[in-house]
Amino acid sequence: MEAQTARWVGILAAVPFVMVLGNSMLVPVLPTLQARLDLSPLETSLILTAFSLPAGLTIPLAGALSDRVGRKAVMVPALVLYGLGGALAGLASWAWPERPWALLVGRAVQGVGAGGTYQLAMALAGDIFQSRERSKVLGLLEAANGLGKAVSPLVGGLAAAVLWFSPFFVYGVLALPVAAAIALGVPQPGRQATAADGQGRKGGGYGQQLREVFARRGWPLAVAYAAGLVTLLVLFGLLSRASDQMEQRWRMREAQRGLLVALPTSLMGLCAYLVGAGLQRRPQAAPKASAAGFTLLAASVPAAILLAGEGGPLGPWSSGRGPGWLVGALCLGGLGVGLVLPALNLAVTGAASRSQRGLVTALYGTVRFVGAATGPPLFAAAASGAARWGLAAGTVATGLALAWGCGKVLRAAWGEPGRSRGEGAGGRGAGAEAGLASQHPEPDMPWV
């Protein structure tokens, strides 16, 4: 990878790293916020919801807008808004502790900004890089996302040790320089290429083109979206439930829990990077990677239940075990997620042409947000009794079904014989890309 290209990748990878701090950095700080602001547990949980809900709703709108005006024209203001929203939340916490609604307004502003960040970074990477480079770059972006998940609890705890409201200001300290780097240091291929690729707008309009994409690729996209939702649901459900267990059973402090939870997320990030690099050389291996990943993810839920020592066939045996056994089950899930996500990211970014990629990718981001938001309450509701084993059985069945479904979709994308470069969708858009895009052609996949 050339020095200039590596610089672009580094800047793009900073976007998911910053975005993922949005909620996870505050998790170890929530008890402090609850005490300082005199909040109920429900009001405290709204600090996370006020961020996630606007972010999930904004992602498709930001993606559609980026298809029209360009990725950078949306990403740069979004990052600025993300940082300013965090600062507003911090100011509200310090200056108006008796008005928690002001804190929630700041978090909502921050969530709107977050909606225009990571998925557009994925779409911009898909615009810039060709198919074999693209898989490695998307793996790097996913690795940066995993790194953010790993270090964010520690960053939040350290910042709160200085001043209890200071974590909110960390967002701006990180996001504003990244916004400047995106604006000044990353190219945007595309005005000519997008215009050529989107000539159909004159005849049928942008909405019609998207309907055609989903009419042709509705089943593969549905499978990919469902896989993304389930993957993040299980991952965050496991992590949140494990964090509760570490506190209730082993009386661990926040820093200890953060360190142990960082192990599976770090493993996920490392695996995502290695798998992305491997798919760059052998994209036809994506079906095997996704199948193996979903199998491991499905196995991690019953393993975590058995090893947590909460009862069941191995309850008495596992009750005397330390938390390392539970962390081992979490690492199994982290490894599974690291195998699955690079293949899914590559498939989704290749599911549409450049002029439509923003919205297709953004919808994928929305379902991932839904999964991450749904997992913790679902796992908490099924924390004991038959519901716990029902959840385990449902996870295993869903994981194996997705292993089969994703394998079928990815085999169709990379395993069709007799397709030569540029033949996808009848060669649509052949020769249309200009400038930087001519150096990085669209992927050789039937999705396009």
Image (cartoon, rainbow, N blue to C red):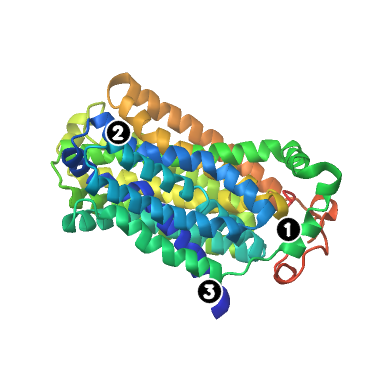
The residue under label 1 is which amino acid type? Asp
Q: Nearer the viewer, residue 390 or 202?
A: 202
Earlier residue among tags 3 and 1: 3
Q: Which residue is mark 3?
A: 6
Measure the C-alpha gap from mark 3 to mark 1.
23 Å
Q: Give the mark toward the camera: 1 or 2.
A: 1
Measure the C-alpha gap from mark 1 to mark 2.
43 Å
Taking 20 as reference, is 429 left or right?
right
Name the residue located 58 percent from the left edge and 43 percent from the top edge.
Answer: 60
Q: Give the mark toward the camera: 3 or 2.
A: 3
Q: Are marks 3 and 2 in contact (CB under 8 Å)?
A: no
SS class, disc 1 = loop
Residue 121, horizontal then vertical, whole percent:
55, 58
The residue under label 2 is which amino acid type? Ile
Count up the numbered dots: 3
The residue under label 3 is which amino acid type? Ala
Q: Residue furthest top?
A: 386
Circle on res. 305:
2
Measure the C-alpha gap from mark 3 to mark 2.
42 Å
Q: Nearer the viewer, residue 149 or 115?
A: 115
One can see residue 1 in this view: no
SS class, disc 3 = helix
Q: Which residue is mark 1?
A: 444
Q: Are marks 3 and 1 in contact (CB under 8 Å)?
A: no
SS class, disc 2 = helix
Earlier residue among tags 1 and 2: 2
